[in-house]
Amino acid sequence: MDNFALKVEDLVVYLDDLIAVRGVSFVINKGERWGLVGESGAGKSLTALAIMGLLQDGWKTSGAVLHDGMNLLQASDKTLSARRGRTMSMVFQDPTTALNPVAKVGKQITWILRHHMHVTQKDAYEQSLVLLNKMNLPRPESIMDSYPHQLSGGQRQRIMIAMALACYPELIIADEPTTALDVTVQKQVLRLLDAAVTERNCGLLLITHDLPVIAAMCENVAVMYGGRIVETGKISDVFTNPRHPYTKGLLASQPTLDNIDLDGGTRLPSIRGSVPPLYAMPDGCAFAERCDFATQKCKELPELDNQIQRVACWNPVAEARKGA
Amino acid sequence: MGRFILRRLAFFAITLLTTSVLIFTLIRAAGGNVAAILLGKNSSAEEIHKLSTELGLERPLPVQYFEWMGNFLHGNLGQAFRSKQLASHLIWSQAPVSVPLSLGGLILAIIIAIPLGTFAAKNFNRPSGAFVAVLSQIGIAVPVFWAGLLLSLVFGVHLHLLPTGGWVPWSENFVGALRSLALPVFTLGIVMASTLTRYTRTAILDVMNEDFVRTARASGMSRRVALIKVGLRNASLPLVTVLGLLAAEMVGGTVIIEKVYSLPGISRMILDNVTAREVVVVQSTVMVIVVYVMTINLIIDLAYGLLDPRIRVGK
Amino acid sequence: MSEMMQSVKNSLKRPRKKSRLPLIVGASITLVMVIIGVISMFWIPQDVNVSDPSIRMLPIGTPHHLFGTDFLGRDVTSMLMTGVRTSVIIGASAAFLSLFIGTLFGMLAASISKLDEPIMRTADIFMAMPGIIFALVLASTIGAGYVTTIFALTSFFTPAFVRVTRASSMRVLSEDYISVARLYGRSRLFITFRHVLPNVSSILIVQFTIYFAAGVLSEAGLSFLGVGINRPSVSLGMMLHEAVEQIGITDPLGVWPGLGIVILVIGLNLLGDGLRDYFDPRFSQRVR
């Protein structure tokens, strides 16, 4: 038995001649919580879908994704489906479209339990009630008997989380789980997710562009830009002493009470330029054209170095922390 | 669901009403003097006037309309001018031909098209799927009567398998009747199946791209199981809608097929009357056909309501 | 760059561009048919209505009668050419008129909310009625012929155009730049024509070809039944009608007109599909 829940090695995801994920590697050990941050289009969702084997037709992958003793990228749909929902599961972004509109919620949950855990319908029903209770959903019997359209977004998302947790997976991937919800509901759902993951000791890969959420829920973080991971490490390190210029810029541009003048006079610092489109990715570092520290060497693609807080950069932010 | 049913029934009633007015107006107003039409070209003004008064054509249109509607609802569909036959008898006599033909074709089309369309969707990126897609494209382009011609040439003439025309009444010989219907139903079914296959393929492809299918797969359903358990059930909604369109196509198809195979059904009856300009009979016959099609549409729409929990159960 | 990336880069394929073949084939076929039709207006081998029983039922390949003659000795080739012309004219006219009227009402329904419900209900009612029935009713009162057929087909197709135009217009109208135009004080009508129309036009062109094909098929069907085109005009469906009446369906005389219809319709369908792909934003490379 490996001690990691997921090991991604040099994952490349591409469609015809468009490379969207350009060589991503990381390891999630059992029980570890990782945040995957980056702007829209950085390749976070595609990475997640590639891991689960749920890419749309036409997309191809290369590299290795090791989980449950095998390379998922080389497995058949049948083999993968034995693991999806059981050893690894995913929570998607939009609760309005994520559930089957013509089937009762109860049926959708019990199917998972019956298929993977081979329990009887009765047992599956009971276990589902317990799951829904854990998700703080009142009157779970009535929810089991409802159709998705009769429930609110927050309720639906909690059901999705329940479905993802049902079989005590080694790894849960949550792709922007609260972005589509009302702000007031977001916190509740995140708290529930947090509690559930703790209780079951699952690995968590939380994908989001929302930095505070990552800080609250995860211990480790990987920063993605232009289809590659540019920095990884413990959150406590990365968020206080970012080594990659992009991470630094990202953190600086977060509105906090410190950098916003309440009478409206401030301009938030932002990173100049914009993300290069997929079809015009430079061969070297994708961030170079926007980077204040770029040099000629940056025309060569940097790999993650081997320090504890790893960065893929030829000119990482000055090792200032080593000093004062 | 209750409100849905009410709304649908209301639409049903209103459409029938409007259509009846439309038909009535078209025949009375657009065609010129009904009496003149019935009597033919060489009639004198006197004769026309006499007939007009007899048939009550001098009265204001709304009055005539309500009389017609009233009679219609009581089963009195008028009569042919020349033969004096009751329109209701004429219509009723061809029901044993047209109804089995039209419904048989529809059912056959469904039986063929749904599995075929599903197959085409499942294998959309493989030659087998593409082949079916192209086949259905060609099938749509083929006019119904031409298909009938070809099929009857092949099966009837060259293979001598099935009769290519003529009708054996049910009362006379049950098997004979079935044999006379075999080719016609087959032709109608195949033609409608082409359109239906195309729609089925599109509907299923669209559904398989939906988010909830992805969730189903993420929960552990293999592609195949997801298609069957989630995809088909959800695709049934747009498909049921398409069936409604098909029902209208079915009427046209039935009329043509009957002509091709010389079956004494609604086709012969209505065409003879149209060429003979028997407006009264045509009027009632058309109304009956519209009722038939609208009823099928009503059933289909209600089925849709039952299938979609968002309508059936509501909030 | 890692080895993996390098090997992927080396193995990359050019995106499979949607084949232009359907478009080219479809356009060619349609063009050929239209040309045949146009030629037939000026020259045909023989008058289509001159019967010469002495040369009846000649087989194909006979000199001077490429496709043979029918049961009355009339030249089939000439009839085919004229028939193609009729199909093209009727199909195109019906499609064009429905496009015109349907687009007008569709855009009205989309931009003026008060008109939306009545227009759509009327369209629904028209759609619920089988087209053939409508055509039959017209034929029994006004009499069959070119005009009746076009009129019947137009009434039959227009609701579909209304639906399509309304849906597309509504989609365009919900875009942000429309709100900006409204803010500038542009009238609804101006917005509709200036902004909605160009965006909707590609869809309309595709629909036009679809209904052109439908018109050809429908006219053929009506003429086959005897309530469409009649002598002295000639139509492919009418030829089949005569074949069935006179000789019965067991004679291959009906094969050629039917084939003509099939070819024309397939050509139009391919053209429509080709145009649809052509107008699709280049980024979508899904081959469906």
Image (cartoon, coloured by chain):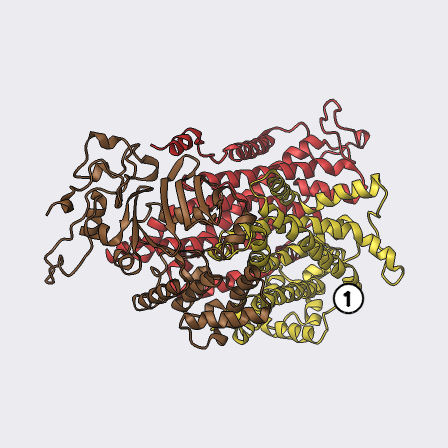
Dot 1 corresponds to which residue? B92
- The location of residue C143, given as percent across then percent down, is 65, 53
On screen, B295 above or below C23? below
Residue A150 or residue B36, whichever sits in front = A150
Q: Is residue A205 left or right of residue C269?
A: left
Q: Is residue A124 left or right of residue C77?
A: left
Q: Amino acid at mark 1?
A: Trp
The hue of chain B in the figure is yellow
- The location of residue A15, given as percent across then percent down, is 43, 39
Residue A310 or residue B168, whichever sits in front = A310
- The location of residue A183, given as percent across then percent down, is 30, 66
Q: Quadrant of residue B169?
A: bottom right
The hue of chain C in the figure is red
- The location of residue B226, given as percent across then percent down, is 56, 55
Circle 1 — which element? Answer: helix
Can residue B43 be seen?
A: no
Provide the letter of the chain coloured brown.
A
Residue C257 or residue A102, whichever sits in front = A102
